Amino acid sequence: MRKILYIVAASATLMLGACNKWLDINDNPNSANSSVPLPEQRLPPILAQFADGYESAGTRAVHVTHQLANVYSATARNYLLTRWYSDAAAANWPWQAWYVNTAVNIQPMIDKAEELGAYHYIGVGKIMKAWGFGYLADFYGLLPYQEFDNPDIITPAFDDAEYIYGQIIPLLDEAIVDLQKNQEPAAPALALGDTYNAGKVENWIKLAYGLKARFLSHLNKKSIYNEDAILAALANAPQTVEESTIFQYVDQTETTASTVQSALQYVNTSASTRVSKLYIDYILNRYTGAPTGSQNMQDPRFTLLVPHSQEPDGSMRPSIGVDFSSDVVLNGPRAYSYSAATNSFINGDTAYVQLREAVANNGRILSTGTWYNHKDSKGLLLTAAEMKFIEAEIRLRKGESGLALAAYKGGIRVHMQIMEIAPAAIENFLNSTSVVQIASALTLSHVMIQKYIALSYSPEQWVDMRRLDYCLDASGNYNEATGVYKGYQRPRHVYADSYPSATSWPRRFAMASYEVNFNSGQLRLAAPTYDLPTYISEPIWWDIAN
C-alpha cells in the first residue's frame, strides 16, 4: 500500500508540474477558498447561519425558562429541557451553526474586505465575531476562541467566558471605528450583502453599541460592573423600531410546504410545542405584585403570543398554559389529533393548543400559531425594546425611578410597535392600571417580567434569569417575597441527578458532543467536571459574585 501511495503522489507531482500554468491562474467562482467569494457574496450566508444558531439557542433556552412546554415524551429533547436537563445532543446545533457554518467564514471575509478597502464589511465581520462568541460563552460558559481557526491545531484549547468577554468588547469598539470610515471607491457597498439592515451603516453602529450594553449588563454580579458605561453605550444604541436589527424571514409562497426560508421559530417549534402557564401569567399580570387597579386592560399582545383554536361554533379559545409546578408534567400534557370527519379533537389534552399554526382541510383553525412562529415571522435579534429595559434596570439601580418608569414604558411600547399593535391600543394599555404608573411603585420584577415577554424566544431571556437568580432569596431558595421572576419554580419533573437540592438551578448548557467525542482532553483541562450530571448546574463566570 505504501508503494501505491508513493506512485500516486509522484504522478500527481508530474501532472501539477505540467499544468501549473493554467492551475495557477484559475479560481472556480463556485468553490469557496481564501479569495472566493467576495465579501458581498460571503456576508449573506454568514448572517443567515448566525441567525439559525442564535435563534435555535433561543428555542432551547426558553424551554429551560419555561416560556415553552412540550407534550410528554420521556426521550423528547424539548421535554427534557423543560426538566432542566440538557445533554450533549441538545447542545449541538448552536455550536455547529456557529463554528462550522459561520465563524470559519468571518476572517476570510474580513481579509478580502481589507484588500478592497471595504471597511464596512470589516466592521460587520468584527460585530458578528464578537456577537457569536459572546452569546455562546453565555450559553456554554467556555469554548475555543484563541485557537479555534488555527489549521495546525486539531484539538484547540478552551477559553473561559471571562477571557472571551475581554476580547469581544474591544472587538466591538474596533468595529465601530471601521464602520465610521469611508470605503475605498472600488469597495462593494454594504447593501449588496446586508440582509439584516439593508446596508444602513448607522444601524450596524447602533447594533455594536447595543451589544456592548447587552454584554456589559450581564456583569451585575461582578466588581467590574459599570452602570455609567452601560448608559453610555445605550445612548448610541437603537432607540426606535427602525434602528433595531430584525431579520425578516421569507415564506416562499402561501402554500409551500418547504421550510427553507421559513422563520427559525416556525422550524424549531412543532405540533408538540405548547405555551406555559408562567408565560401566560406574565402576559396577563397574574403574578405576585403585578400592577393592577380599577382600569385594568388585557395586554393587546395576548392574542398574538398565545395560540388560539377555533370552536365548532366559530369562536376562538386561547390555549391554557402548562403548569410546570403541577403533576401535569409527570406524564403530560398528552398530544392530540383532529378528525375532520367528526369535526372534533380526539385522543389528548386539547386545552393546550399546539404552538405551530394549523388549518384543517375543512377550514377550521386548529391553531393560530404565534407572532414569532408563523412561517414569515421576524427574528428579533437586538431591538430598541431590549435597550429600554436595560436602561430601566440601570435607572432603578441608580435610584432614578422617574427615568426608570419612562424606560420601562418605552420598552413595552417599542415591543408592541414591532408587533404592529395599533397605536391607540398601545397608548390605552400604557395608560391603564395594568402598567405601573407611579415611579416609586416600579420594581425590578415589573421591569424584568416585561423584558421576559419582549425577549420571547431569545437566549437573552435565560441570561437575565440566571444573572438575577430566578426567584430566589440570598440562600438560593425559591422566595416570591424577594425573588425577581415571580412564579418561576422548580418543575415537578425536575431532573434530580443534575439538581439534587432545592438550591440547584440551571446555570449552563452541556458541552456539545463534538468536543466531548473529539476534544475531551482539552475539555477536561478547562472543565474537569464536564461529564458529571451536576455540571449544568455550575454557574459560569459572570454568574459568580465577586
Image: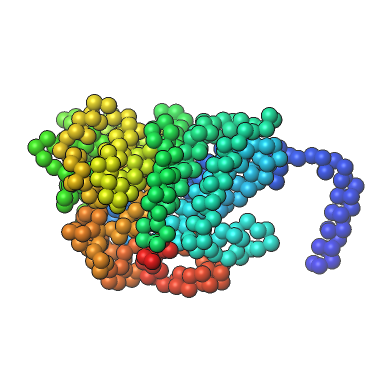
- The image quarter in which residue 507 lies: bottom left
| Towards the viewer: 346 or 456 | 456
Which residue occupies the foreground of this view, 144 or 341? 144
Image point 27% across, 33% down: which residue?
365
Q: Is residue 276 visible?
A: no
Q: Position of residue 473 (x, y in %)?
A: 23, 64
**Who's the residue at 30% across and 47% down the image?**
395
| Figure disc tally | 0
Q: Is residue 407 left or right of residue 197?
A: left
Pick the residue in front: 28 or 202: 202
What residue is drawn where x is 58% and y is 65%? 157
Residue 484: x, y in percent? Answer: 25, 55
- Name the quarter where the N terminus is drawn: bottom right
The colour scheme is rainbow
Q: Is residue 363 left or right of residue 315?
A: right
Q: Where is residue 350? Give x, y as percent.
A: 22, 45
Q: Is residue 423 at least partly visible in the picture? A: yes
Which part of the image, by quadrant, shows the C terminus?
bottom left
Q: Is residue 271 left or right of residue 25?
A: left
Which residue occupies 25% across, 42% down?
402
Measuring from the top left, give residue 371's x and y in whole percent. Answer: 33, 36
